[in-house]
Image (cartoon, rainbow, N blue to C red):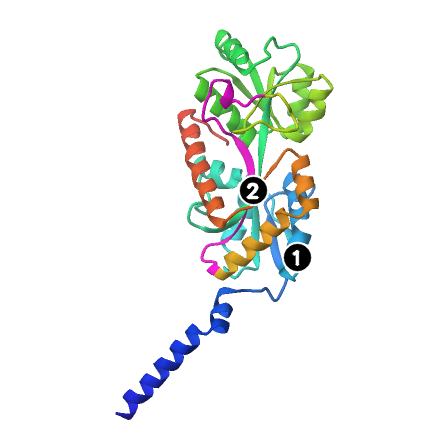
Amino acid sequence: MFSRLLWKVVVAGSAFLLGAPGFLHAQESWSPTRPLRLVLGYTPGGAADAVARDLAPVMEKALGQPVVVDYRPGAGGAIGAEAVKTAAPDGYTLGLIDGAPLTIIPNARKVPYDPRSDFSYLGVVSKSPLVVLVNPSVPARTLPELLALARAQPGQLAYSSSGNGTIHHLAGELLKAASHSDLMHVPYKGAAPAMNDLMGGAVAVSFATIAPAVPVVQGGRARAIAVTSAREVPALPGVKTVAAQGLPGYDAQGWFVLAAPKGLPAPVVRRLNAALNAALQTPAVRERLLATGSDIEAGPPEAAAELVATDFRKWGQVIREQQLRFD
């Protein structure tokens, strides 16, 4: 009898505690008590590093702890992604990861993680459209005119990219598949040499990042004939999208997401998502990202997971159908 009475008291007391606002708040909130690590799969000085260094100090203010960038370059960003996957799911290891190691590389070769199930996604940081450029000597001022040239000269018209397996490469392959045209891919070791050879006339076409392309277009050294996003880009007024020029549904963009190891508790996910969104709404961060032609993508964690899943399917199909190899 006494034991049953004691059990009822314990249960009643537990129910009271669980229903108390202070207890619920403790279960629903999280605050870091030591520095956080932001893993980057690339070397210092590149586009990913610039985004990380914009975000880190602002997130530090929101979280009350330092955010230290940890460079893990190699394998197209896959080494950095693996470092995030294998870390403890405690909120202290984050990864600023782009689409290549999450949606392109895993469709082309074996990697030690599954981007669809091995991460807790915290939010989309930004999306970066590309621009289709042609050398001024190319007699095409619209995308349909360029595709007509490609069909008239199968395999003769070459496009440059910043390398095999990059978003610049896949954007070109998606265009080929969607338009049933035959462009020849010429990969370069970086965006700068790819742009240089376009301006020099060694290649006729290039898929380029917006920011470095704008001065080239303004200087008349290349002509912009299309952007690869779903909407036009303010930095290139009047340049229509690929979709608006006869290929509806075409969308090929680079992006960054903030990720953490699988199994991150929901209160930690919410707090880190809030810190990310606060950073993205900061005027200085917004100004710098928009200046590069990027779109700010503040939103819920689910948007990042959906973006990864969607692009994983899209680029997987392109890689299979076009029989691409990145070895």
Disc 2 from disc 1: Cα separation: 20 Å
**Dot 2 corresponds to which residue?**
297
Residue 305: image location, x then y, percent: 46, 45
Q: Say if residue 166 shows up in the picture.
A: no
Extreme bottom residue here?
2
Q: Which label's residue is closer to the chain start, 2 or 1? A: 1
Foreground residue among 287 and 143: 287
Q: Is residue 316 magenta?
A: no
Amino acid under label 1?
Answer: Glu
The residue singled out by tag 1 in the image is 60
In the rendering, at what x and y percent does residue 93 appear?
56, 56
- Assess whether mark 1 and mark 2 are in contact (beta carbons under 8 angstroms): no
Q: If the image is split into quadrants, where does the N terminus sit? A: bottom left
Out of 87 and 254, give the one closest to the viewer: 254
Q: Is residue 164 above or below residue 51?
A: above
The foreground one among 168 and 222 is: 222
Left/right of residue 28 with respect to residue 69 in the rendered view: left
Q: Which residues are magenta?
A: 240-266
Quadrant position of residue 315: top left
**Residue at image x 63%, y 47%?**
281
- Few, some or many residues within 10 Å of mark 1 (<14, 14–19, 20+): some
> Residue at image x 48%, y 44%?
303
Mark 1: which secondary structure? helix
Amino acid type, callout 2: Glu
Q: Is residue 76 above or below residue 159?
A: below
Within the magenta stretch, is there residue 242?
yes
Taking the image as shown, residue 206 lies to the left or right of residue 180, namely right
Q: Residue furthest left?
A: 1
Q: Is residue 6 left or right of residue 238?
A: left
Q: Is residue 267 among what the camera can see?
A: yes
The percent coordinates of residue 9 (x first, y second) are 35, 85
